[in-house]
């Protein structure tokens, strides 16, 4: 029991530190503990997850439900979440029952890690390590998002994504243009639009044909 409590406090310390590492607005410990719903949600989730593993599933769901009311973040207690997980801002985040999340994952507000139907079994995404998912993105179904993937704001991802990729659009498309800085942070203001790029290419080809026919 003592070792379990010790490991729990160690994870909480990591969850606090990752806020300092990712959010320049975090000024002091009191502010982080009192004013970050993402931290409240992950602490409550870890407690609910323990109860779920011990077979106390109703109690686990009650904790999850109360956490959603307080924070606006819904994490099913059966989901599996790794270390140093950070939800920035947090409002509207939904993480489904069979979701698996690796280490060092960052989610922004309004992200959904959801299913696509009423099938039983694994029906939610598996998220690798060092993944960033932008605001409003939807990752749906039993798909794999590999390590070091960046998903742009508002994207809808419904198929597997290989490692070290950047995904944007509806449905999500893998783009080749670099959209991360030297530290690997997602540069939301420089995410390309693959549809616009394709239209621009078609316009250029049409103009070229017009010039050749003149």
Image (spheres, rainbow, N blue to C red):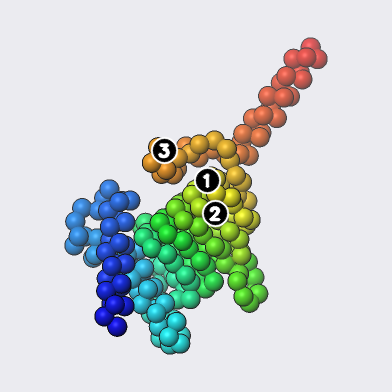
Q: Name the residue at 47% across, 70% down.
A: 80
Compared across the picture, whether 35 is left or right of 194 comes to left
Residue 52, quarter of picture: bottom left
Give residue 4's position: percent from left, percent from top. Answer: 31, 78
Tell me, yes or no, whether the two marked residues, 3 and 2, touch with CB atoms within 8 Å: no
Q: How many marks?
A: 3
Helix, strand or loop at disc 1? loop
Q: Name the residue at 60% across, 44% down.
A: 174
Residue occupying the far right of the picture: 213
Question: Which badge, 1 or 2, comes first in the chain's sequence?
Answer: 2
Tell me, yes or no, whether the two marked residues, 1 and 2, touch with CB atoms within 8 Å: yes
Compared across the picture, whether 155 is left or right of 81 comes to right
Mark seen at residue 181: 3
Give residue 64's position: percent from left, percent from top. Answer: 41, 77
- The residue singled out by tag 1 in the image is 164
Compared across the picture, whether 154 is left or right of 81 comes to right
Is the C terminus in the top left, top right, bottom left or bottom right quadrant?
A: top right
Residue 124 or 110: which is nearer the viewer? 124
- Does the image show residue 77? yes
- The residue singled out by tag 2 in the image is 146
């Amino acid at each position: 029991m003592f070792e379990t409590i010790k490991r729990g406090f160690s994870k909480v310390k990591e969850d606090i530190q990752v806020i300092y590492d990712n959010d320049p607005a975090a000024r002091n410990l009191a502010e982080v503990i009192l004013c970050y719903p993402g931290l409240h949600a992950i602490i409550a989730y870890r407690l609910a997850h323990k109860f779920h593993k011990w077979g106390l599933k109703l109690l686990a769901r009650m904790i999850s439900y109360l956490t959603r009311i307080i924070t606006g973040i819904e994490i099913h207690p059966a989901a599996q979440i790794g270390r140093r997980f950070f939800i920035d801002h947090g409002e509207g985040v939904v993480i489904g029952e069979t979701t698996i999340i690796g280490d060092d994952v960052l989610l922004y507000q309004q992200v959904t890690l959801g299913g696509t139907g009423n099938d039983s079994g694994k029906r939610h995404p598996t998220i690798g390590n060092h993944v960033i998912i932008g605001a409003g993105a939807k990752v749906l179904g039993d798909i794999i998002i590999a390590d070091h993937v960046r998903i742009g704001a508002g994207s809808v991802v419904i198929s597997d994504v290989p490692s070290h990729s950047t995904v944007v659009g509806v449905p999500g498309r893998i783009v080749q243009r670099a959209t991360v800085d030297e530290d690997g942070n997602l540069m939301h203001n420089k995410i390309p639009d693959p549809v616009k790029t394709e239209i621009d290419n078609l316009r250029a080809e049409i103009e070229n044909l017009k010039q050749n026919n003149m």
